[in-house]
Amino acid sequence: VGFVAGAEVLYRGLLGEFHEDAFHDQTCMLVALSRMLLSLSARLDAASNAGPTPTLGLATVSAVLRLFFPTKPREHLNSLKRLLYNSSTSQAAQRQRRASRPIGEGAADSPEEEALVMVNVYEVLGLRPQPEEDPLGEFLLSDLLQDPPPFVLEIRRQHLVESWMFLDRVQKAMQMIFQRA
């Protein structure tokens, strides 16, 4: 009898027994996202002669997240964007921006103000500055696993929730098929 890993994962999911491969999938996803953000940051920093710290604009990171997670619900993307915004702006800078607004204006930042917010990729992903010689990504992997920041924890949480939502849709579809038969 042949063993099909995908069928086993689907079967366990339908039974409600979530497999440990979900953690592996999350980690692979986070490594790919980290490498994408670091690579994009390196290209943009090289073009603008920026410093050694990889930074991207909040709007750029938001666009990357929409492309990287095309089926992620809008609420989840907004939650990630809010975490990015909160981790990228210091409390003092937020207070200074709010204090400079005219009285009666809302507390939310305008799209123009949000476009100016820069995201430190190392800080958001919980990575330490890496030596150039890390071809296997060992430092990247250990940083993502050992002490993940709130952004990484939220991505992991959302992945788990979205996986359960998907399995719920599959279970409902299977029930509908069997009810018709």
Image (tube, rainbow, N blue to C red):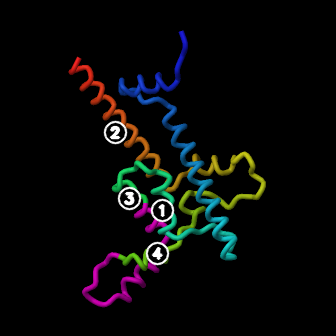
Checking the image for residue 63, the label placed there is 1
| Main secondary structure found in the magenta portion | helix
What is the three-letter code of the residue carrying label 3?
Answer: Ser
Q: Earlier in the sequence, mark 2 or mark 4?
A: 4
Q: Secondary structure at mark 4?
A: helix
Please give left or right for residue 44 compared with residue 90 in the image. Answer: right
Which residue lies under the disc numbered 4? Answer: 115
What is the quadrant of the C terminus in the image? Answer: top left
Q: Earlier in the sequence, mark 1 or mark 3?
A: 1
What is the three-letter code of the residue carrying label 4?
Answer: Ala
Q: Earlier in the sequence, mark 2 or mark 1?
A: 1
What is the three-letter code of the residue carrying label 1?
Answer: Ala
Gap between marks 1 and 4, in whole Å?
12 Å
For the point 53% across and 72% down, which residue is it?
A: 118
Gap between marks 4 and 3, in whole Å?
17 Å
Q: Which residues are magenta?
A: 81-108
Which residue lies under the disc numbered 2? Answer: 165
- Mark 1: few, some, or many residues within 10 Å (few <14, many ≥20)? few
The answer to if 151 sits in the magenta stretch is: no
Look at discs 3 and 2 and give the one toward the viewer: 2
For the point 68% across and 61% down, which residue is it?
A: 129
Checking the image for residue 79, the label placed there is 3
Q: Position of residue 84 (x, y in %)?
A: 46, 64
Look at discs 4 and 3 and give the one toward the viewer: 4
Q: Earlier in the sequence, mark 3 or mark 2?
A: 3
Q: Quadrant of residue 13?
A: top left
Q: Is residue 166 in view?
A: yes
Q: Nearer the viewer, residue 140 or 169?
A: 169
Q: Position of residue 39 (x, y in %)?
A: 65, 59
Q: Earlier in the sequence, mark 4 or mark 3?
A: 3
Gap between marks 3 and 2, in whole Å?
17 Å
